[in-house]
Image (cartoon, grey):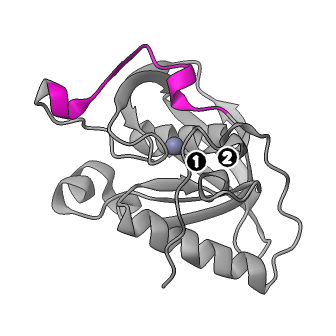
Amino acid sequence: MALLPIIQPDNPTLRQKAVRVSSFGPELQKLIDDMVDTMTAAPGVGLAAPQVNVSQRLIVVRLSDDEESKKEHGEEAGKLYVVANPKIIKASRDLVEGVEGCLSIPGWVGTVMRHEEVVITGQDRHGKDIRIKARDWLARVFQHEIDHLDGRLYTDIAEEMWRPDERDEDGEGDPT
Ligand code: ZN
């Protein structure tokens, strides 16, 4: 298990447009495993390669598998998604507001409008084409992570930001 340092916005990698993944060899496999370990340890529900200072189009997503999450998200809870070169090919017109955090911006959360439903294409860890339909919280996490690949942070589009500690209330958004 290897934990990678998660960078913060003072590192320019977080603002770069990441390049496509083109090789699915051992180096990528190690990066994926390390990203999953890093996301799990943080803990977070999503991580994009630029957050560990690797400017490649790769994301990992895993919603919590605790009881509450299972009730809310069914079989999506605890399921690991590894997507190289993810692309949103379809997005619902409906936008929904939700609370997000980001592992690269510790201590803050904010409200962000996102598409309620998205369809994503990309490749799995072995380069095989995949297609994922996601809605609600899972769709939000995917949109947040894919934004990272284009150098966008949720703070760019958040309507309001606050520090959950200071308000003495739970930020419901798990960091991504
Ligand atoms: Zn993030």
In the rendered picture of this protein, how many numbered marks are placed on residues? Answer: 2
**Secondary structure found at label 2:** strand
Residue 169 horizontal/vertical position (percent): 13, 31
Identify the residue shown where x is 51% and y is 19%.
94
Residue 38 horizontal/vertical position (percent): 47, 68
Query: Callout 1: 10 Å neighbours few (<14), some, many (20+)?
Result: some
Q: Is residue 141 above or below residue 159?
A: below
Nearest to N terminus: mark 1 or mark 2: 2
Indicate the quadrant where residue 150 lies: top right
Residue that numbered label 1 is attached to = 133
Q: Residue furthest front?
A: 10
Residue 21 relative to residue 166: left or right: right
Residue 86 horizontal/vertical position (percent): 72, 50
The reply to whether the magenta stretch includes residue 157 is yes
In this rendered view, identify the residue nearer to me: 7 or 36.
Answer: 7
Instruction: Check contact, mark 1 vs mark 2: CB within 8 A.
Output: yes
Q: Measure the C-alpha gap from mark 1 to mark 2.
A: 6 Å
- Three-letter amino acid code of the residue under disc 2: Ile
Residues in magenta, as a range: 152-166
Q: Is residue 98 above or below residue 39?
A: above
Residue that numbered label 2 is attached to = 120
Residue 172 relative to residue 43: left or right: left
- Three-letter amino acid code of the residue under disc 1: Lys
